[in-house]
Amino acid sequence: MPLAPGPAAAEGAPPSGPNGGVTPWRAPLLWRGLLLASRVALLPVCRLRVTGAQPLAGAPVILAANHIGAADPVVLMAACRVRRVAPRIMATGGLFRAPVLGPVLRRSGQIRVDRRRVDVTAALPAARAALDQGSALLAYPEGRITLDPGGWPERGRTGLARLAHDTGAPVVPVAQWGAHLLAPWGAPRGLVGRLLWALVHRPVIRVHFAEPLDLTGTRVPQATDQIMAALTEQLAALRPDEPELPAWVDPNRPLSTARSRTRPR
């Protein structure tokens, strides 16, 4: 079912060109600077390893990443910098209400998602408009940091599959592992301690860009399952020494199997 047109004031709505067409999006200098800054910021605290395919620059693509911790955005920004892609991130609405971060997110073209409000679906037309502009769109199909005891991807929400269905944009699973070591649950509480640990140990953080999924003719629920299965498969390859539980278990992270997926053995 096609998405309804979004409100004119939606975060990320595209400007019209002089002839009524959509103006291709170019990442603002501010956003390109922040992508570079994220890469530099990680150098003292980890060894970033980025593998896999490189998304086509200027082509609409949905980057679907698993969500394991509060440091994920910085890690994924740095990985995208390595891959020379400037994504627009679907970020929780609370970040847009922050005094300094909010204006930065708005000025850099990021897309607001108010997950616990009745207008949460307003983000989908804005995301579709971003894809119409040829943007790379980065989002977490789980919709939250995983609460699975093993840190595995949970069952996904259908939003990204709906976007792929309505726009024809390819979906690239982006599996990542290690970001949970940099920021504990409840950060900024406990953040200094984890960063001091990371300065000493410089853990390896891995990000893998998989090949685009072929979701042609696949219904939205099945496409969602296919995205999450691909993420789980790619993540398993990144953590062969941690097949069940993470080597480091955050004692403050709440655990739940309510949305856990059954993983193939």
Image (cartoon, grey):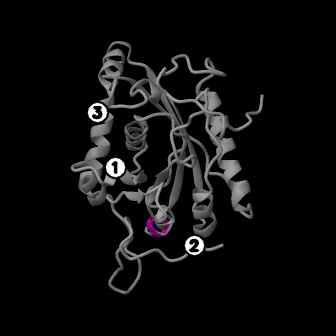
Residue 7 percent across, percent down from the top left: 42, 75
- Quick check: 169 left or right of 6? right
Pointers 3 and 2 in contact (C-beta within 8 Å): no
Residue 95 numbered tag: 1
Disc 2 crowd rating (10 Å Cα; few below 14, some 14-19, many 20+) is: some
Q: Nearer the viewer, residue 87 or 2?
A: 2
Give the amino acid at mark 3: Val
Q: Quadrant of residue 38?
A: top left
Estimate the spatial distance between the alpha carbons at disc 1 and disc 2, rounded to whole Å: 25 Å
Q: Quadrant of the C terminus?
A: top right
Which residue is tagged 3? 40
Foreground: disc 1 or disc 2: 1
**What is the chief secondary structure element of the magenta stretch?**
helix
Estimate the spatial distance between the alpha carbons at disc 3 and disc 1, rounded to whole Å: 22 Å
Residue 90 percent across, percent down from the top left: 44, 54
**Residue at 61% of width from left, 21% of height from top?**
245
- Quick check: 26 left or right of 203? left
How many numbered marks, from 0 up?
3
Q: Quadrant of the N terminus?
A: bottom right
Does label 3 or label 2 sit earlier along the sequence?
2
Residue 113 percent across, percent down from the top left: 44, 57
Give the amino acid at mark 2: Leu
- Quick check: 170 left or right of 83? right
Estimate the spatial distance between the alpha carbons at disc 3 and disc 2, rounded to whole Å: 39 Å
Disc 3 crowd rating (10 Å Cα; few below 14, some 14-19, many 20+) is: few
Residue 237 sits above or below residue 77 on the image: above
Write the start and end of the magenta stretch as one range. Answer: 126-132
Which residue is tagged 2? 3
Taking the view exactly as shown, the residue that stands out farthest to the left is 100
Foreground: disc 3 or disc 1: 1
Does label 3 or label 1 sit earlier along the sequence?
3
